[in-house]
Image (cartoon, rainbow, N blue to C red):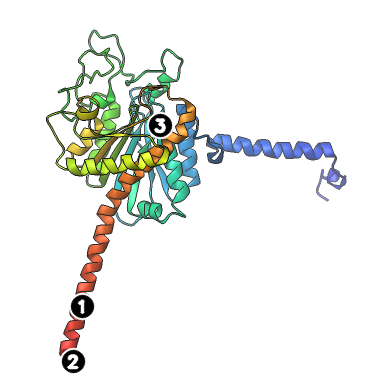
Amino acid sequence: MLPGSASLDKKPTMKGSIMWVLLVLALVVQDRLAGGLEHKSYDYTKYHTMDEISAWMNQIERENPDVVSSMIYGQTYENRNISLLKIGLNSTTTKKAVWMDCGIHAREWIAPAFCQYFVKEILGSYEKDSKVNALLKNLDFYITPVLNMDGYIYSWIDDTTRLWRKSRSPGTGNCTCFGTDLNRNFYANWGMVGISRDCCSEIYNGPSPLSESEAKAVTDFLGMHQNQLLCYLTIHSYGQLILVPYGHPNISAPNYDELMEVGLAAAKAIKSVHGKSYKVGSSPDVLYANSGSSRDFARLIGIPYSFTFELRDEGQHGFLLPEDQIQPTCEEAYQGAMSIINYVHDKNFKSAAITVTATLWTTLTALWISSTNVI
């Protein structure tokens, strides 16, 4: 008998057993909370605060160490780390990649909700769905759930801040207003159309290109991975649109026709889910002219497939999309995004596989003919 363990010979009481079970449960819950939100209980049909999303990112990485890692690639004006999730099966060589960002505009809460849903879906299906498995084998996904973290946090304060759009950097000179429209701050026809030089305007494009640390962080990352990236998807709301480059009415992408074809196929995939119609076109054709967008910058530096998604709705609720529409919105947008991603993947990998196979058969046929002639 161990010293001080005489009580172990006594029959445990019901009360003691219950207390022991409660203590164990409390320790388990504490351990899970210390690590962040439990993935299985995470509610994808609700909007989440930045703290909740950050905890979710940590949990996703811990639960999927073989396919998920995180990366800090910049800081916001208020010194928050801008992080992304890198999702893909391990490879000994550098892989091609797809970029997706959400929440560049703070009030568009459905966008970060979609990024989270997208991550959930691909991680939940790649082991049993051969198509998704092939995507993760051949591609890496760089996904930023909330790019404009400062603005997003500000939009959660109360009803007076709920519709905040811009970053939270202070105005320059005599301007007392805050914020720059991050999607007017990229070095792509900066300041030409669809912007305002009034720093209090919602479409103020900043004092100079890349004046905002968030826009510079994305620019630097894209520059370092320029030859790796095949597809750029930036998620917004609202309007039910799929936008192709460019925002300037007098400039077209060199592969405009192909982008339209791919976008129309994505809109068809979206409509097949819940019957919602998405318009497809350049911003001047179906929305309004603009400049300095991340979509245009991505195409300008050579990323061939660059699209903006404007999710539900068409104005009935606008930026205040009810939570009961989160799931159907994400379900249809997921099919639209996957339509584009599958096209990009198949064009780059299936065609290559067919070429290799054809070359192999040609070589084998030539060898067979040669051996026949020898005989």
Residue 276, position as x, y percentages in the image: 38, 34
Label 3 is placed on what type of residue?
Pro
| Residue 48 shows in this picture | no
Circle 2: is it few (<14), some (14-19), or many (20+) Cα within 10 Å? Answer: few
Q: Which residue is mark 1?
A: 365
Q: CA distance from mark 3 to mark 2?
A: 68 Å
Task: Tell which circle, 2 or 1, labels the residue nearer the N-terminal end.
Answer: 1
Point out residue 216 in the picture as x, y percentages from the top left corner.
Answer: 26, 30
Q: Residue at x 20, y 35 (%)?
A: 245
**Residue identifier under label 2:** 375
Q: What residue do we see at 29% from left, 54% from top?
A: 346
The residue that mark 3 highlights is 112
Label 3 crowd (10 A; few <14 / some 14-19 / many >=20): many
Would residue 42 be visible to someone looking at this image? yes
Q: Residue furthest front?
A: 275
Reading the chain from its start, which is encountered first: label 1 or label 3? 3
Q: Quadrant of the C terminus?
A: bottom left
In the figure, is residue 50 to the left or right of 235? right
> Measuring 80% from the left and 49% from the top, which residue is drawn there?
2
Furthest-right residue in this view: 10
First in residue order: circle 3 vs circle 2? 3
Q: Is residue 266 left or right of residue 48?
A: left
Give the camera-side residue of 103 and 256: 256
Q: Nearer the viewer, residue 308 or 297?
A: 308
Q: In the rendered view, would you say 225 is above or below 210?
A: below
Q: Residue furthest bottom?
A: 375
Query: Are the two marked residues, 1 and 3, in contact with CB atoms closer than 8 angstroms?
Result: no
